[in-house]
């Protein structure tokens, strides 16, 4: 999978609530992946190109500095708890695509693509789906949805006029943009650099 850019939430009450639910989901799904850090992926799938981590760090510093000329923080609303029926999007908290997030995503995509061009026959990047994964596991859509429904029944999250409240929290405040080496299994992934937002 190569290198990825992750948005990492501030530690605090929402992060603790997410970690509590992650622990419950992991206990209920023996075939899930090893533990991985709490994050929303900004950009991934960079394993198809040769990227030096220090060069990516320079690019990331510049794009964050540029983004900060218009923004003082990155706070993003929580949209829903859902499944995309794939291993890495098995049960997720989807995020609202607000302007600050989309500006950072567009800046990151453009900076990476211009500095580290994809090979000629690379697949097109899928539409950006911002989310925080709660678990990676080989669940069917029905199995994942059943666990999501159980979370809703237990009051882990409730629907609001503009998304959801997860244990009373309507939004996530991101602390940093991290460069992560996603080589190997999720438990082997490691953060190489962290840039404060």
Image (cartoon, rainbow, N blue to C red):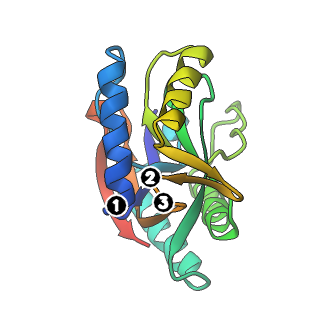
- Determine if residue 37 is in view: no
The residues bearing labels 1 and 2 have C-alpha atoms spaced at a distance of 9 Å
* Residue 169 circle label: 3
Please, what secondary structure does the residue beneath circle 1 have? helix
Query: Residue 197 appears at what percent x and percent y?
Result: 44, 73
Q: Is residue 51 left or right of residue 142?
A: left
Residue at (33%, 26%) from the top-left corner?
26
Query: Residue 14 appears at what percent x and percent y?
Result: 39, 57
Residue at (28%, 32%) from the top-left corner?
187
Marks 1, 2: nearer the viewer: 2
Within-10-Å neighbours for mark 3: few <14, some 14–19, many 20+: some
The residue that disc 1 covers is 13
Query: Residue 93 appears at what percent x and percent y?
Result: 54, 44
Q: Disc 1 vs disc 2: Cβ atoms closer than 8 Å?
A: yes
The residue that disc 2 covers is 167
User: Which of 34/82 is in front?
Assistant: 82
Within-10-Å neighbours for mark 1: few <14, some 14–19, many 20+: few
């Amino acid at each position: 999978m190569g290198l990825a850019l992750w948005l990492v939430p501030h530690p605090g009450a929402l992060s603790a609530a997410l970690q509590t639910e992650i622990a419950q989901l992991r206990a209920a799904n023996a075939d899930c992946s090893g533990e991985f850090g709490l994050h929303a992926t900004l950009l991934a799938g960079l394993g198809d190109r040769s990227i030096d981590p220090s060069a990516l760090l320079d690019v990331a510093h510049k794009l964050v500095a540029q983004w900060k000329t218009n923004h003082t923080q990155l706070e993003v609303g929580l949209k829903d708890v859902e499944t995309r029926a794939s291993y890495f999007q098995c049960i997720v908290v989807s995020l609202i695509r607000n302007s600050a997030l989309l500006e950072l995503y567009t800046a990151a995509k453009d900076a990476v693509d211009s500095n580290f061009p994809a090979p000629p026959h690379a697949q097109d990047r899928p539409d950006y789906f911002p989310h925080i994964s709660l678990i990676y596991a080989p669940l069917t859509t029905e199995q994942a949805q059943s666990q999501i429904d159980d979370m809703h029944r237990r009051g882990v999250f409730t629907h609001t006029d503009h998304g959801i409240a997860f244990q009373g929290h309507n939004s996530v405040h991101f602390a940093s943009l991290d460069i992560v080496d996603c080589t190997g299994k999720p438990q082997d992934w490691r953060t190489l650099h962290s840039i404060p937002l």
